[in-house]
């Protein structure tokens, strides 16, 4: 199943950009997610909610996309995804450092995707919420 991405804004205590991922996040589309988040940051967005409610699958490339999104929203240069192992190693380094952030959050993660996030440690890098309302309230 192809990945569909939607972007919307939410007003609250702080402005939040919501990126909804629907389908499968893998090597065929991960760069689109990175480009979307780069565009949000370049336009001044600083708070990002990744709505994963309808994300049914995530590959290692998808993990790189989520980690790169986290780095981009921190104003950091992401690892070059062309060097796959280096990008995956960067995830491990951030996990080992306990680099939890609060301006990037996820919500609605399905069980299978959450297992992948937890097993890789990536799930601990940003707060996760059961649904969009709970996540928006946390910003």
Image (cartoon, rainbow, N blue to C red):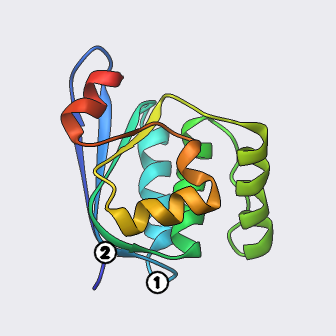
Q: Measure how far apart labels 2 and 1 are at the Cα level.
A: 9 Å
Q: Residues within 10 Å of mark 2 (few under 14, many from 20)?
A: many
Q: Secondary structure at mark 2?
A: loop
Residue sitting nearer the eye, 134 or 21: 134
- Most extreme residue toward the top is 13
Quarter residue 71 falls in: top right
Left or right of residue 16, residue 9 in this image:
left
Q: Which mark is residue 3?
A: 2
* Residue 2: percent from left, percent from top: 29, 82
* Residue 19: percent from left, percent from top: 31, 50
Q: Residues within 10 Å of mark 1 (few under 14, many from 20)?
A: few
Residue sitting nearer the eye, 2 or 91: 91
* Image position of 44 with respect to 26: above or below: above
* Image position of 76 with respect to 68: above or below: above
Q: Which mark is residue 70?
A: none
Left or right of residue 41, residue 48 in this image:
left
Q: Residue at x 19, y 33 (%)?
A: 133
Left or right of residue 34, residue 98 in this image:
right
Quarter residue 99 falls in: top right
Residues at marks 2 and 1 touching, judged by CB atoms closer than 8 Å: yes
* Residue 50: percent from left, percent from top: 36, 48
Quarter residue 5 falls in: bottom left
Residue sitting nearer the eye, 33 or 116: 116
Q: Residue at x 23, y 19 (%)?
A: 12
Q: Is residue 123 visible?
A: yes
Question: Which residue is tagged 1?
Answer: 28
Q: Which sits earlier in the primary sequence, circle 2 or circle 1?
A: 2
Q: Residue at x 52, y 81 (%)?
A: 27
């Amino acid at each position: 199943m192809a990945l569909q991405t939607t972007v919307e804004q939410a007003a609250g205590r702080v402005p939040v950009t919501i990126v909804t991922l629907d389908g499968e996040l893998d090597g065929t589309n991960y760069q689109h997610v990175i480009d979307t988040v780069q565009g949000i940051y370049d336009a001044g967005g600083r708070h990002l909610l990744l709505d994963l409610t309808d994300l049914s699958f995530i590959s290692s490339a998808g993990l790189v996309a989520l980690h790169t999104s986290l780095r981009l929203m921190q104003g950091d240069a992401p690892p070059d995804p062309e060097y796959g192992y280096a990008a995956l190693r960067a995830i491990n380094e951030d996990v080992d450092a306990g680099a939890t952030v609060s301006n990037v959050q996820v919500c609605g993660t399905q069980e299978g995707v959450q297992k992948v996030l937890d097993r890789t440690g990536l799930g601990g890098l940003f707060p996760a919420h059961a649904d969009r309302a709970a996540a928006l309230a946390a910003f």
